[in-house]
Image (spheres, rainbow, N blue to C red):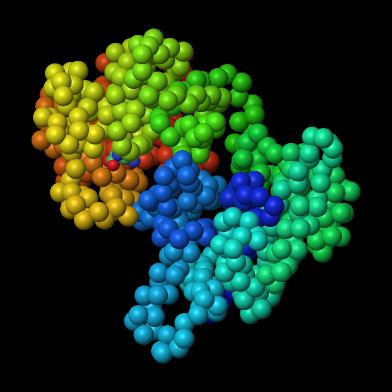
Amino acid sequence: MAKQKNKAKYIFVVGGVMSGVGKGITTSSIGKILQSRGLSVTTFKIDPYINVDAGTMNPTEHGEVFVLKDGYETDQDMGNYERFLNIELSRENYMTTGMVYKSVIERERNLEYQGKCVQVVPHIPLEVIARIKKTTKKNAADVAIIEIGGTVGEYENILFLEAIRMMKIESPKDVITVMVSFIPTPSTIGEMKTKPTQHAVRTLNSTGVQPDIIIARASRPLDEKRKEKIAIFCSVRKEDVISAPDVESIYDVPLNFEKDYLSDILLAKLGLKNRKHTGALEEWAKVAKRIHQATEEVHIGVVGKYFKTGDYVLSDAYISVIEAIKHASCVIGKKAVLTWIDSTDFEEAGGEKKLAELKQYDGIIIPGGFGTRGIEGKIAVIQYCRENKLPYFGLCYGMQLLVVEYARHILGLKDAHTVEVNPDTKHPVVDIMPEQKENMRKKNYGATMRLGHYLAHLIPKTIAEGAYGKESVMERHRHRYEVNPAYVGALREGGLVFSATSPDGVLMEIAELPKNKHPFFLATQFHPEFQSSFLYPHPLFVAFLKACVKKK
Ligand code: GLN
């Protein structure tokens, strides 16, 4: 008789006091420690905003848009889950208020509620619950971990908290709630204060939900006294207050959780006792240690434009790129130091001098981007890298602009451009595809780019093929424009190598210069950073970093 699969278990992760203290990393790390107890895990992110997906949001507003294999444009936390857990998530693992309402309204219009009055409660939380259960089953997961964006007490996420309450009534033994809460240490007092967390728990209680575990995020590890205080005032056991101090590397968080025996506590609460440690976490710890051991630095300049917002520099927009560099640097045993460089700096007076300053870096990355601001600066940087044999790695827009630079300065097509910036250029070396033109005409901007993973064939004996060690790869895309097939012949004749193309050979996926001309001058139309994970770094990032180290 086939072994009956156990009932799935559900862990909700909610935030207290304030956001931005690591709910995503907590969710990912809980997943990791449960995986290391032999459980299969799936994760969900719930964002309380009305946008149906994250695709239309400005990165300065929302951080990076993470693209899933199936092309769905989601929150950056989905990237964290994939990087930690080595799982591939789908659009069904993501939810926004807008998406949930949209499907409830559509179902109502289709008479699927059989004439009932469709109400915010219970129909919206029921839809949330149905989605979570269906996807958990589809993924054959033992445990689903569901992160609810924002913090408790926000009007926006109340319906999702309601979903927890309703699920808990239905199966109290299968559902637990973890609250990630911030414990401040005001400099004037010099002491950790638990009161904000006590208030946050009260607020959560007012929705009918009691946290089972409290993850106490603080600058330092929590002492016993603070644990006791939180336990008494927040009605949890002292053991269920987990110390989560600031860390130098996010990949240490699962290891820190286990110092407080979190996986044992979770298993006991979910009725999944007596599971051995598989040893997977020891493997993880070995790699995590390399981050601290590396002393020799490799300096990477990242040239982009979404960096400045008010007085702050916002690197959140490139989180997957940052993490992919970290993963690769673990392989080569170096400490990657990133510097954010605003491409508009190269367009102002003194741009030439600024360009010369690039020689202090061991390599340059130009990540994805949109629009016209800072573009000439980026092109100037690419030209500098090419002419000075400085390793260059372009991602998406970084490849399109490489092609523009090459066409202008090697093929002599002076006004070559992408039509994204100059729709009237005489030489549209990067052009919009016909179906995309139609989308733009209809102002159909949401989820209409070339999105998600596509197959690319690699050309033998190229740098790309050498790095991957394969004939073909699946990589994730997010762009409207492509290298114009009409110019591919001329670019090739001019010495640019297209080392990967779509299977029909029409779309260019990777451009590079041969090794005898440049140590590393390579760019991808897709986003390799979306498929790099901590234990499986992306081969192109590894190849780039190796070239940077060599340049040193
Ligand atoms: N703006 C370019 C396009 O739409 C590149 C997009 C990107 O870098 N993700 O094609």
Percent of width and height locating residue 508: 22, 38
Viewer-nearest residue: 424 or 268? 424
Using the image, determine if residue 407 lies above or below residue 165: above
Viewer-nearest residue: 155 or 425? 155
Residue placed furthest toward the right: 225
- Judged left or right of residue 127, residue 218 is right
Q: Residue at x 21, y 23 (%)?
A: 406
Q: Is residue 41 visible?
A: no
Q: Residue at x 78, y 40 (%)?
A: 185
Residue placed furthest toward the bottom: 115
Using the image, determine if residue 224 lies above or below residue 332: below
Q: Which quadrant holds residue 514?
A: top left
Percent of width and height locating residue 201: 74, 61
Q: Dividing the image into four equal quarters, which quarter contains ligand 1?
A: top left
- Judged left or right of residue 49, residue 221 is right
Using the image, determine if residue 108 lies above or below residue 289: below
Percent of width and height locating residue 453: 33, 50
Viewer-nearest residue: 164 or 455? 164
Q: Is residue 431 visible?
A: yes
Percent of width and height locating residue 381: 34, 20
